[in-house]
Amino acid sequence: MQAASASLESGRERAYRYLRETVLVDPAVQGTFLNEVGLAQAVGVSRTPVREALLLLVAEGLVEMVPKRGAYVPPLSGRQIKELMELRALLERHAASVTLATGTVPLAAMREALAEQEQLVDPIDADTAKVFIEWDRRFHQSLVDATRNDLIARTYAGLRTRQMRVGVAALFRATDRQHAVCVEHRQILDALESGDETAAHAAIEDHLQITLQLFLEA
């Protein structure tokens, strides 16, 4: 019985990770219904672990279960994107302040993430966009992690799926957006490296507001 339970748990976790990290970050799935059979085949599990993973995602507000229709991925609304950017701004500005005060700004990790992004600025396609935004996420997550506050770091990490969905979609809403992102990241890095807290806060705020505007003006 314990072995069967462990196997089911493992299947649910694999399905959950696949949905969060692969399926839901694809802008093409927004506004569509998910095929549980196809998901089960892709993950290599039965439909039960997939259904359990979907229910976890329902609790997180990423998926809706529609009677007689199945699992629906609702598009992120302008309000939801605005709230995401507000939360990110709060956490990232706090992280900048803390790491500057303690001398723990993770400049090396942030430079590495930016360098990886700069290798992906052209050409851009769906797969490249996902990799680009994953490095984007690591750029920001490394700053938050450097606060050495586990609760804040976990809270920020929990935004990953929403960050990926918004970030990938944003790359296709403006010409050469990936190059602009690299410039904005460089401005954040320069401010942090110079120890200028005010400039760092402003660079972070500007970066997030530009992404938000791409959606509000669409």
Image: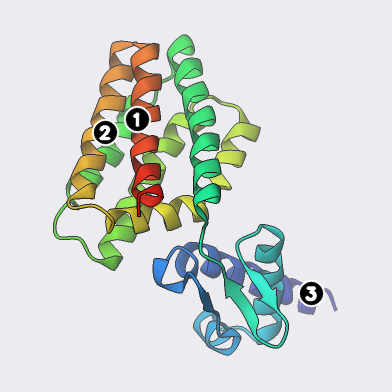
Q: Where residue 125 is drawn, which disc sits there?
A: none
Vertical arrangement, residue 66 with respect to residue 63, above or below: below
The three-letter amino acid code for the residue at tag 2 is: Glu
Q: Do the residues labelled 1 and 2 touch (CB within 8 Å)?
A: yes
Mark 1 Cα within 10 Å, few/some/many (few <14, many 20+)?
Answer: some
Q: Name the residue under label 1.
A: 206
For the N terminus, give its image quadrant: bottom right
Residue 157 position within the rendered picture, expressed as x and y whole percent measured from the top left? 54, 44
User: Alpha carbon of mark 3 to alpha carbon of mark 2: how far?
Assistant: 47 Å
Q: Name the residue under label 3.
A: 5
Q: Nearer the viewer, residue 143 or 126?
A: 126
User: Alpha carbon of mark 3 to alpha carbon of mark 1: how far?
Assistant: 48 Å
What residue lies at 28% left-to-right and 33% top-to-bottom? Answer: 185
How many dots with numbers? 3
Q: Name the residue under label 2.
A: 184
What residue lies at 30% left-to-right and 41% top-to-bottom? Answer: 113
Of pointers 1 and 2, the one earlier in the residue sequence:
2
Secondary structure, mark 1, is helix
Image coloring type: rainbow
Q: In this view, does 98 lie to the left or right of 49?
A: left
The three-letter amino acid code for the residue at tag 1 is: Asp
